[in-house]
Image (cartoon, coloured by chain):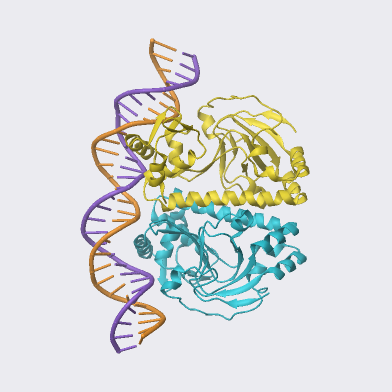
Chain colours: A cyan, B yellow, C purple, D orange
DNA sequence: TTCAAGTAGTGATGAAGATCACACAACTCT
DNA sequence: AGAGTTGTGTGATCTTCATCACTACTTGAA
């Protein structure tokens, strides 16, 4: 198992979209060689495989660290391998010819990226860009295919993980295809985002850590609409925002607005 | 292997949405006991499994025929098994509380329905309704899980199939999330729909076999907008419609309109 | 400390498309 | 043949947002 720190122009040599502008906090956390104590064990689908399968995976994976704004792979690129998120967040997005961007989801520790292209040999259909300094375990496509052929339980895990991806894609479709207004979509996003938030006096406290622009790309509307809807929610005392911290004051009301 | 003909109120006892109104052509084709000469062999992902795997699948599947408008399963229902489409078309859809419907895709012979819920034990996230008299091979969840655990090659096929579903979901997201106009979406739909159409004098001739309402639900707009866009396309001599036959006169121009 | 870039808030305006309201065509069923 | 049902075409509005245009705040780098 090897470890390395990537620069903002990373991996495949593609120019990172955000890092081009400004790598926010290049190396904000310690680089570690091993990743067994990260999300991989507790969160990941690979938590329920047999010990020898887990060991086999441990031997072929390679841990690396990326700064914020690094591109792991881009839409249209051939699949070279899979990335397992250990720490940090990665946004999965697609862009049209106008430059309009849509974010499918924000990957969290335990998520595996590039699974579908690796399995089926098709080009990447999405682009993956780190939002924060992120730690990833990489497995080359060759090794990965060999691995799942030799470990039946891993293959089933892969299928389940793909099923999860599918499920979350369906959720996105429902959200952007069946919604009636921007407020509805933003409310739904906030309810989901604050799902596992700690309860404090006055409501749920969540780190938002996304710009209005990014939220707009997640729910499919303009940046200004997000801004206006937030103002409206604040006016109605549903939420409060302090820097990157979101305080959900009335989750029930938000959930009502979000009813699909 | 058993065979049966279902009535419009079918399978799970749920009321079929369309059949409630009018089962269009109840039993429009002969019921056969075996399905080896249908899409399952040529089209399906299961075409590339080993002979013994294919034989094992043959032993646990159960072929049945459904009229148009039958509901195979509904959103929210628990997974009982998977359906492999042998003949006919099945629309996969979701509905919101207003009754607004969005169609994810039209399943064709070779497609497997309910794979994700069967694998992961989650409830169905979508509803499946036959568009035409349809022949399906059913495998109970229990049998199916046993089958893929015993046959490693089948498991990989399952993963690839889920990957395909995922991919098509991403395409839907791109289409409804990144499009700039209804005409763009309709053009894209028509280009895709006429992908494997025979070329005749004057263009590609395709069976559309969908109402404007259904097309609207596929591309995410109102019925009237589909009607108006079609009028516009006819005016520009891009397409012609005769009953359920669509003649694509200028695929190139449509493709230009459809550029994402 | 100052400058530049990125981010956020908010008004004004316009355009796309949903919705409503019909007329009419095509089909099925008596 | 006539009646009901479904599907289609098209005009007239009305709403919602996207877009433009600006101001102001924040933050990091020089």
Comparing D4 with B87, the one in front is B87
Along the line of sight, which residue is nearer the eye, A52 or A205?
A52
Residue B76, position as x, y percentages in the image? 58, 46
Say how many tags the image has: 0
Q: Is residue B122 visible?
A: no
Residue C18 lies, with reference to residue B22, above or below; the image says below
Q: Is residue A93 above or below residue B217?
A: below
Comparing B190 with B172, the one in front is B190
- Percent coordinates x, y for residue B47 in the rendering: 68, 42
Residue beneath the point at 66% across and 42% down: B82
For the point 62% across and 50% down, the residue is: B162
Horizontal side of residue C26 vs A3, given as left or right: left
Q: Is residue A10 left or right of residue A95?
A: right
Q: Residue at x 42, y 75 (%)?
A: A22
C3 shown above or below A226: below
Q: Quadrant of the N terminus of chain B?
A: top right
For residue A5, say whether it is visible. yes
Q: Position of residue A238 (x, y in %)?
A: 41, 63
Q: Give how far across and how far down residue B27 sits, in percent.
A: 60, 24
Relative to residue B64, is residue A143 depicted above or below? below
Q: Residue at x 77, y 38 (%)?
A: B59
């Amino acid at each position: 198992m090897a470890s390395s720190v990537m620069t903002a122009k990373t991996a495949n040599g593609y120019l990172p979209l955000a890092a081009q502008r400004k790598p926010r906090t290049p190396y904000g956390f310690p680089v570690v060689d091993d990743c067994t104590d990260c999300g991989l064990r507790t969160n990941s689908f690979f938590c329920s495989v047999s010990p020898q399968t887990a060991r086999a995976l441990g031997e072929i994976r390679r841990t690396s660290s990326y700064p914020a704004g690094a591109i792991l792979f881009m839409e249209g690129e051939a699949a070279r391998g899979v990335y397992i998120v250990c720490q940090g967040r990665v946004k999965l997005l697609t862009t049209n010819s106008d430059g309009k961007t849509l974010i499918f989801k924000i990957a969290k520790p335990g998520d595996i990226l590039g699974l579908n292209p690796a399995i089926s040999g098709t080009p990447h259909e999405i682009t993956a860009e780190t939002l924060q300094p992120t730690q990833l375990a990489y497995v080359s496509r060759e090794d990965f295919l060999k691995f799942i052929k030799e470990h039946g339980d891993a293959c089933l895990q892969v299928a389940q993980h793909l099923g999860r991806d599918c499920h979350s894609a369906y959720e996105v479709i429902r959200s952007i295809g069946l919604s009636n207004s921007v407020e509805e979509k933003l409310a739904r996003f906030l309810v989901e985002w604050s799902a596992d938030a700690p309860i404090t006096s006055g409501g749920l406290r969540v780190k938002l850590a996304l710009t209005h622009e990014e939220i707009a790309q997640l729910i499919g509307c303009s940046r200004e609409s997000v801004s206006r809807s937030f103002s409206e929610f604040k006016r109605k005392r549903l939420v409060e925002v302090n820097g990157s911290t979101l305080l959900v004051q009335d989750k029930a009301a938000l959930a009502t607005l979000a009813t699909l």
